Amino acid sequence: MLPGVGYVVTALGGLAFGMADQYLGSRSALGAWAAVASLVSAPWVLLGFVAGTTQDEHRRALLMGLLVTLAALVGYFVMTCSPIENVPLPRFGSCFVTIARTGQNPLWIAGGALFGPVYAFLGHLWRTRRSWIGAAAVVGALCLEPLARSVATPWMLSSAPEIWWIEIALGLTLAAFFVRRAVAS
């Protein structure tokens, strides 16, 4: 692969993920599940983990985790401020800046800048050493998020409980995958 292509692919993947996540959340006609699915946090850390599993060097894994997470956040904000979401094109710049610096978004940006690289490093450790720490962190994020949400935002659990069961099922499926891969290696 040409130098730099991996970075471009990672950034484009992050942009697409963020845009798709925001678009799904805005489709209220699909039902409450769409908005709740868009608010699930674990796929965002899974994104960093997956980026890290593509890297043999830990520094590059950290950089890829930061890149994919920040690109996903940019994609999310771009879609939020786009004509697709009924924001006139001339208001795009002011909308983007306002969204990025208001509400809880600065916290999400800081969290992404921290945890994207952390999970990418854990993905790298899984790739290079079959480290159980990374596998446990991913499975824990998926399986324990519903419990954390029941404390922090209980309304989310009751509005679309199927999303939380799907997230737990995905976590358990990944747990089985990690066990199988570790045994095979």
Image (spheres, rainbow, N blue to C red):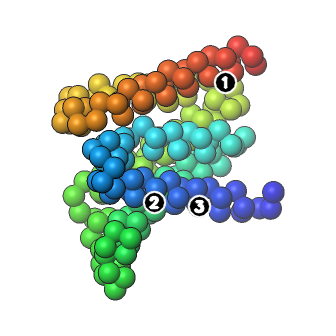
Kindly identify which residue carries mark 3.
12
Position of residue 12 in the picture relative to residue 142 (left or right)? right
Q: Is residue 44 above or below residue 179?
A: below
Q: Which residue lies furthest to the front in this view?
A: 29
In this rendering, position of residue 118 left or right of residue 164: right
Tell me the number on the disc at residue 19.
2
Q: Where residue 145 sits in the image (x, y, percent)?
A: 35, 30
For marks 1 and 2 on the same chain, the one whose residue lies earlier in the sequence: 2
Q: Which residue is drawn at 80% across and 62% down?
A: 2
Q: Which amino acid does label 3 sit on?
A: Leu
- Closer to the eye: label 3 or 1: 3
Between discs 3 and 1, the one toward the N terminus: 3
Q: What residue type is labelled 2?
A: Met
Residue annotated with mark 1? 130
Q: How far apart are marks 3 and 1 (CA)?
A: 27 Å
Quadrant location, the C terminus: top right
- Say which element carries label 1: loop
10 Å neighbourhood of mark 3: few (<14), some, or many (≥20)?
Answer: some
Q: Which of 84 and 110 is in front in this view?
A: 84
Q: Which amino acid does label 1 sit on?
A: Arg
Disc 2, SS: helix
The kind of secondary structure element at disc 3 is helix
Q: Distance between the residues labelled 2 and 3?
A: 10 Å
Please state if 45 lies on the left or on the right of 91 as rendered: right
Residue located 55% across and 48% down the image: 65
Count neighbours of disc 2 (C-alpha within 10 A) and say few if under 14, some if 14 to 19, many if 20 or more. Answer: many
Cβ atoms under marks 2 and 3 closer than 8 Å: no
Residue 15: where, in percent of width, then height? 51, 60
Query: Can you see residue 5?
Result: yes
Q: Where is residue 113 drawn, in percent x and y?
A: 44, 51
Question: Between disc 2 and disc 3, whose residue precedes?
Answer: 3
